Amino acid sequence: MTLRQANPTPGGEGDAAHYTDPMLAMANYQLDLAAKHLGFDQGMLDWLRTPERVLEVAVPVKMDDGSLHTYTGYRVQHSTARGPAKGGIRYHPNVTKEEVVALATLMTWKCSVVGLPFGGGKGGIAVDVRALSRAELERLTRRYAFMISPIVGSRRDIPAPDVDTDGQIMAWFDDTVTMIRGEADPAVVTGKPLDLGGSLGRGEATSRGMAHCTEFAAGRLGIDLSKATLAVQGYGKVGRFYAEIMYNDYHSKVVAVSDISGAYFCGDGLDINAVSAYAKQHNGGLAGLTDAMSGVEFISNEALLALDVDVLAPAALEGQITARTAGDVKAKLVVEGANGPTTIEGNTILNDRGIVAVPDILANAGGVTVSYFEWVQGLQFDRWDLATVDRRLLNVMKESFDNVWDVAQQHKLGLREAAFLVAVDRVAESMTVRGLFP
Ligand code: NAD
């Protein structure tokens, strides 16, 4: 990384308080800090911060009972300076324009920190998918895909699954765009089912990338993972695979896992394969685990965060390590699987207490990295074997982690500040070298 020499931006980090979304506040706080280090002036900072395009669409859906319901959807392209926008689509009742802007912004820095040729985007619909039938979900998805289709495409903006969206939804999205355009574009979305051009290894890629980051950070901190204890918050797509990899491949002792029903603790270590089998039989959930397994104790999700473990992996949702909870964290290492699990205040407390946190934009970037591999395979109508995907993922994560670690050491920064410094510098470099059109 080359840091450009210039005059520091006066003021800098004051803006975070303006954002009601804590993820956006954190992302822009970190951007301000990075811009200050890099010596950018206010004009450059505003250009870096402002999303390129924010699209809000009406999504009318004919419900099964014949009534009409109109949902609100968004697609945000925060930056395309380094390549097409890339980012998932979230279906959740709490989706707001600001949340989608926050997630799109995080995608810009995430793709940049791992060196992918993508910018950042994100989409979402404010909807509770649990209240929809499968047919309603398909109509919702197809109408949304149609409404945002003018700005998506394999060389413009490539969606993917996020919270409460999956491969089936990507398949409907892909098919809708194919029908509209009259030609196949297998790289228009990622996270597709394997039969439709999905990549091997995508399902567990985020967790595998987290596991690599855990290994690299543990190596630097002198933690022996085969003797280490772990607590994992969230047992969905990210948390479950992560717990399985750490248990089976690194032989770590996973003493606690959790989901929306609460947390489950066993001081001697949980049999993670049995926990996953239980979750599979119970619709993915962990409720009732204490009755099914001897020696397992029910604790609160907050108590999980405060466990005396070597590694804590928040892999559920945003805003978990906060001014209120960060002081109780006893882990030596935090590896962020979720997007935005740590607030600005929580991050300051972790930094002050010397707790090393591998930030979300680096720790969970394995998912978008394998999405990039899927996009490349789609553009080439090609298919890679799993060993190739895993080897390339390891290379990307290793190079990215080492780079961020070295920048942190060199500039005496936390890993989050260093990751943003690397990411922001690369995006700014691309913007500067492109110049300002027209
Ligand atoms: P998911 O819906 O599959 O799983 C979420 C898990 O969190 C579930 O086990 C759920 O029960 C649990 N949970 C919900 N509320 C909780 C609470 N209050 N306390 C504890 N657990 C709670 O979602 P996912 O795909 O695993 O995503 C989890 C996080 O990782 C999100 O922040 C997402 O944006 C982020 N992420 C996901 C990917 C990916 O590839 N899936 C990639 C990057 C980042």
Image (cartoon, helix red, strand yellow):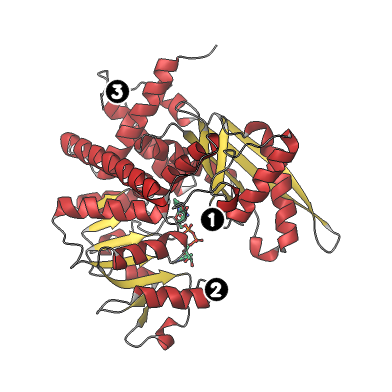
Q: Position of residue 329 (x, y in %)?
A: 26, 63
Asked whether residue 3 appears in the rendered view, the answer is yes
Work out how far the residue at label 1 is from the one at label 3, CA to CA, in angstroms.
36 Å
Of labels 2 and 3, the one closer to you: 2
Work out how far the residue at label 2 is from the one at label 3, CA to CA, in angstroms.
51 Å
User: Measuring 20% from the left and 62% from the top, which residue is drawn there?
Assistant: 225
Q: Say above or below: 292 vs 119.
A: below
Q: Which residue in the protein does label 2 denote?
A: 283
Work out how far the residue at label 1 is from the one at label 2, CA to CA, in angstroms.
16 Å
The answer as to whether callout 1 falls within 8 Å of ligand 1 is yes
In this rendering, position of residue 328 left or right of residue 279: left
Q: Position of residue 162 (x, y in %)?
A: 53, 52
In this rendering, position of residue 131 left or right of residue 167: right
Work out whether residue 404 or residue 261 is closer to the camera in this orientation and state it. Answer: 404
Quarter of the figure with residue 156: top right
For the N terminus, give its image quadrant: top left
How many numbered discs sit on the rendered protein?
3
Q: Which residue in the protein does label 1 denote?
A: 163
Marks 1 and 3 in Cβ contact (< 8 Å)? no
Work out whether residue 354 or residue 280 is closer to the camera in this orientation and state it. Answer: 280
Q: Say above or below: 269 vs 163.
A: below
Work out whether residue 74 or residue 208 is closer to the camera in this orientation and state it. Answer: 208
In this rendering, position of residue 175 left or right of residue 340: right
Q: Earlier in the sequence, mark 1 or mark 3?
A: 3
Asked whether residue 336 appears in the rendered view, the answer is no
Work out whether residue 42 or residue 141 is closer to the camera in this orientation and state it. Answer: 141
Instruction: Identify residue type, mark 2.
Output: Asn
Residue that protrudes farthest toward the left in the picture: 222
In this rendering, position of residue 155 left or right of residue 228: right
